[in-house]
Structures are given as structure tokens and as C-alpha cells.
Image: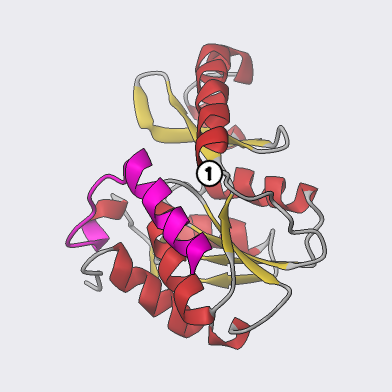
Amino acid sequence: MLRYKNRQEAGKILADLLLKYKYKKDAVILAIPRGGVEIAYFISKKLLIPMNVLVTRKIGAPHNKEFGLGAISENNSSYFDVKSLKLLNLKKKDLINEIKKEKKELKRRKILYRKKPLNIKGKTVILVDDGLATGVTAQAAIKAAKSFKPKKIVFAVPVSSVEAGKKISQKINEFICPIVEKNLGSIAVYYDNFDQVTDEKVITILDKAWKS
């Protein structure tokens, strides 16, 4: 099974697949925090194009927070998986408390991480995350990115499930993913080191990216 040593290696491998965007003045990388930030940094460094963040929060199932039923993102963008909601006999209103909680966290992260204004209108946007299982966070991020009216959206991710990859590909201009698995399981399985990314690490990476 193909796997990465860490997010740094994953970022460098993705960067090699995105070389046609190197030096592009109208291109910008948007990392989905927290895991996507470290990967995006190494892509930004190699392609020599700026990076920023697009904050997105997963809405988990009531008894299994890791199972994403939907997600929220910036500009009041949201996405909910109708199939999964029906499977669990749930409606969006049943998740209202979770949505409120995640909206607060989204606001907190946006204030903490956003050091520069998000200016992507008319630009090529490269969205970056560290893995797609259900793909709900990616769907919300894409909706948010589109609300800012970019010229083009590329989604770059080290590993994805087949189902998530197909859904995402239909919503964007280009999907870049070296590992696409039918039976994905946990994203962490595809990394030797998949440590949790802290707020402090995100801020340190963003400070380095914007000073370079």
C-alpha cells in the first residue's frame, strides 16, 4: 500500500504534480485547516505562489463525531450529505446544536489564522487538504471558494476515497490526488506520521509562509 512519511512528504509530492502552476501570478493556494496547512506550505514554497486559509468545519454524527454528515465554511457556505442523513434517519434541524458549536469554532479559527485578506476573485485557486474520506469538508470548502468568484478551482489532496474523488471532480476544474482508494478506511493509515496539527503550528507555518 502506498503511504507517506508525513505531511511534508505529501506536500512535496503534490507540488511535483502541480508544477504547471509555478510562478503563476494569478494563482493562490488555500489550505483547509488544520491538516491542510502544513501540506499547502510545501506546495507554496515549491511553486512560489502565495497561500492563505479557507476555514471549514465538519459536522459529525451525534454518536460518532468522526463520521461527517456535513460541513460549514466561510461566507455561510454549507454542505450536507442527504444520503447519510437518511441512513441515520436524521434531518439538518437535528444537528442544530452541533452546527452552532462549529460556527463558533469556525469564527475563532478565522480570526486566529487569517493574517491577510482573502483575495481570490478572478484567480486560480488551489484548495489543499490532507485527505478526503467522505469529502463533506471539501464540498463545503468548494462552495465557499466559489462564492468569492475565482477563475478556476483545483483541488489537491494526498489521498482520497473513490466516492469522494468522483463527487469533488464534478464540482471543480481539476482534481489532483496520487492515492485514490476504493476501501479507504482512516486517512491516518496512509501516513507513517499523522500527528495532530495544533493552532500554534498552524500560526507558525502561516507566519513563515507570509514572511518568505
* Mark 1, other Cα within 10 Å: few <14 / some 14–19 / many ≥20: many
Give the residues in magenta.
Answer: 189-212
On the rendered structure, is 61 left or right of 111?
A: left
Q: Residue at coordinates 50% horizontally, 71% vertically from top-left?
A: 44
Q: How many marks?
A: 1
Q: Which residue is mark 1?
A: 137
Q: In the rendered image, which quarter is residue 126 located in?
A: bottom right
Q: Say what amino acid the circle numbered 1 marks.
A: Thr
Rendered location of residue 61, percent (x, y): 43, 25
Q: Residue furthest bottom?
A: 20
Membership of 184 in magenta stretch? no
Rendered location of residue 199, percent (x, y): 37, 40
**Which quarter shows the N terminus?**
bottom left
Q: Residue furthest left?
A: 192
* Residue 23 visible, this angle: yes
Membership of 203 in magenta stretch? yes
On the rendered structure, is 55 left or right of 184?
A: right
* Residue 130 visible, this angle: no
Please say which color scheme the image uses: secondary structure
Q: In the rendered image, which quarter is residue 5 located in?
A: bottom left
